[in-house]
Amino acid sequence: MKTMSEFFHMGGYAFYVWTSYAISAVVLAANVALPLMRRGRLLADLRRRASVRRRA
């Protein structure tokens, strides 16, 4: 158990290391989520425009 504790403590730099991991995870998640959300909005807008054109 001592080695696992040392691993999580990381020689006194644990706060900086785990914070950088958390920030990296947030950025990676945003790089996936934001384009998917934008794609959904664009497709909805295109559907709306197509239905308006069909009515006219």
Image (cartoon, grey):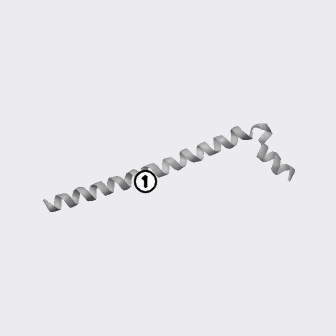
- Give the secondary structure at mark 1: helix
Residue at the extreme right? 2
Q: What residue type is labelled 1?
A: Leu
Reply above or below: 54 against 41: below
**Label 1: few (<14), some (14–19) or many (≥20) C-alpha neighbours in 10 Å:** few
Residue 17 picture quarter:
top right
Q: Which residue is drawn at 27% across and 55% down?
A: 46
Which quadrant is the C terminus positioned in? Answer: bottom left
Residue at the extreme left? 56
- Residue 5 position in % (x across, y down): 82, 48
- Residue 28 position in % (x across, y down): 54, 47
Residue 19 picture quarter:
top right
In terms of depth relative to the viewer, which is nearer, 41 or 24?
41
Q: Residue at x 17, y 58 (%)?
A: 53
Task: Say whether residue 46 is left or right of residue 20.
Answer: left
Q: Which residue is drawn at 56% across and 46% down?
A: 26
- Residue 33 position in % (x across, y down): 47, 52
Residue to which mark 1 is pinned: 36
